[in-house]
């Protein structure tokens, strides 16, 4: 697939087309300024949930393909990766709903697997969540995508404005030597977390686990982050509801609201593990400059992005995930690796990856290297 964005040629064409194939997606003029109709609430019946599952799975396939071929850090990659993460979470939610109604695990209908499509409904929902699409001209959008970058710490990270000026945290890893790796896991804790944590400890791979407040509200979640801390890992802040309600990014909140949420998760981690967290990663990597600077000045948290995205949300095949992750590490030679400890394929691939790194001359280094780099020590 060509390395192209998936905005439609115009919103008007969307009204006449039920879906958009991966081959038909183009780098366009921005959609015309029209009112986007609200997405209807999901019906609580299995047939409706299955139809939504197929619609979202089809779109996920498109975004997965683009994310893999686009250069990491490019506008195309950032849009695809954020959209894909969001859609994977929606897909898992629908899967649980179908299982609850039918008692059976739903893996999708075969015809939907043939080719990816992004429907108008999915595109509209993504626009509501991220605000990627607007009525600005193509030239204005492209100028904003390529020219606006705000340094946060020179040589460590900056905010890049892409896709209708959505602010993304872009991480650098020049402070790492060739062969040095930092492992990070997002969106936990979950039922697989303790196994992943123990495997990283056994592989002498101190990692960072960026946790969600909603997942540590109960006793199970608290026990899991205690295990992470006991295994020698850094328990860090990701957000509460994966940022704003409805899994929207922090840009949907004021700076004060974001600080209250992030600070609350920080205190819960501290109260549970006995150690204050040191790191923060915004969900999707989306956050404003003001919010990010306030997280540092008000909460003392070091921002962390990534330089190697395994895209583990895009496949359930652990072999495919492992091979692609290894290829990305070999190509870059060092980096901050992003995975998720909530996916079965990630658990399996991460356990293999730790062994592969040790056997192939790579070293998993302490997350404290990021603190020193950010603070200029």
Image (tube, rainbow, N blue to C red):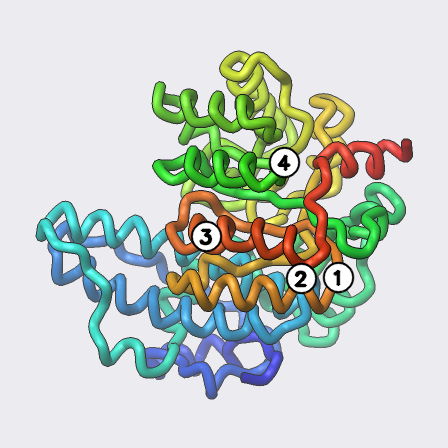
Tell whether 375 sits left or right of 235: right
Q: CA distance from mark 2 to mark 4?
A: 18 Å
Q: CA distance from mark 2 to mark 1?
A: 6 Å
Q: Identify residue for label 4.
A: 206
On screen, 219 above or below 144?
above
Q: Is residue 281 visible?
A: yes
Q: Looking at the image, which residue is at 78% across and 33% down?
A: 371
Q: Looking at the image, which residue is at 45% across and 52% down?
A: 346
Q: For label 2, count other residues whose C-alpha is less than 10 Å away and answer few (under 14), some (14-19) or many (20+).
A: many
Q: Is residue 169 visible?
A: no
Looking at marks 2 and 4 on the same chain, the residue that comes earlier in the sequence is marked by 4
Q: Identify residue for label 2.
A: 329
Q: Looking at the image, which residue is at 56% across and 35% down?
A: 201
Q: Quadrant of the C terminus?
A: top right
Q: Which mark is residue 333?
A: 1
Furthest residue to the front?
359
Looking at marks 3 and 1 on the same chain, the residue that comes earlier in the sequence is marked by 1
Q: Secondary structure at mark 2?
A: helix
Q: CA distance from mark 3 to mark 1?
A: 21 Å
Where residue 123 appears, as percent x and y from the top left, is 43, 66
Where residue 43 appears, as percent x and y from the top left, is 17, 53
Q: Identify residue for label 3.
A: 346
Looking at marks 4 and 1 on the same chain, the residue that comes earlier in the sequence is marked by 4
Q: CA distance from mark 4 to mark 1?
A: 19 Å
Q: Quadrant of the N terminus?
A: bottom right
Contact (Cβ within 8 Å) of mark 2 with mark 1: yes
Looking at marks 3 and 2 on the same chain, the residue that comes earlier in the sequence is marked by 2
């Amino acid at each position: 697939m060509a390395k192209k964005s998936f905005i439609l040629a115009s919103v008007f064409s969307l009204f006449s087309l039920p879906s958009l194939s991966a081959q038909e997606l183009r780098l366009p003029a921005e959609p015309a300024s029209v009112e986007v109709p609200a997405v209807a609430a999901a019906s609580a019946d299995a047939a409706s949930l299955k139809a939504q599952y197929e619609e979202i799975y089809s779109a996920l396939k498109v975004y997965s393909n683009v994310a893999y071929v686009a250069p990491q850090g490019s506008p195309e990659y950032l849009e695809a990766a954020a959209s894909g993460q969001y859609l994977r979470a929606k897909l898992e939610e629908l899967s649980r709903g179908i299982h609850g109604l039918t008692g059976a695990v739903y893996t999708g209908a075969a015809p939907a697997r043939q080719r990816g499509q992004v429907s108008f409904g999915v595109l509209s929902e993504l626009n509501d969540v991220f605000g990627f699409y607007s009525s600005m001209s193509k030239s204005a959008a492209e100028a904003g995508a390529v020219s606006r970058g705000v340094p946060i710490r020179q040589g460590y990270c900056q905010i890049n404005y892409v896709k209708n000026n959505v602010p993304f945290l872009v991480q650098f890893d020049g402070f790492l030597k060739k062969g040095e790796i930092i492992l990070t896991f997002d969106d936990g804790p979950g039922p697989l977390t303790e196994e992943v944590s123990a495997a990283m400890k056994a592989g002498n791979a101190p990692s960072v686990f960026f946790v969600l407040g909603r997942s540590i509200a109960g006793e199970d979640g608290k026990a899991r982050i205690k295990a992470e801390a006991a295994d020698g890992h850094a328990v860090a802040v990701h957000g509460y509801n994966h940022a704003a309600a409805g899994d929207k990014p922090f840009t949907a909140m004021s700076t004060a609201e974001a600080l209250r949420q992030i600070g609350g998760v920080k205190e819960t981690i501290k109260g549970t593990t006995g150690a204050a967290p040191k790191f923060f990663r915004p969900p999707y990597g989306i956050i404003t400059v003001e919010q990010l600077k306030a997280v540092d000045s008000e909460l003392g948290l070091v921002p962390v992005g990534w330089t190697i995205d395994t895209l583990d949300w895009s496949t359930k095949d652990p072999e495919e995930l492992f091979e692609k992750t290894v290829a990305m590490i070999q190509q870059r030679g060092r980096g901050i690796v992003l995975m998720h400890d909530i996916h079965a394929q990630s658990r399996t691939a991460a356990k293999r990856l730790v062994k592969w790194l040790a056997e192939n001359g790579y070293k998993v280094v302490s997350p404290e290297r990021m603190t020193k780099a950010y603070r200029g020590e």
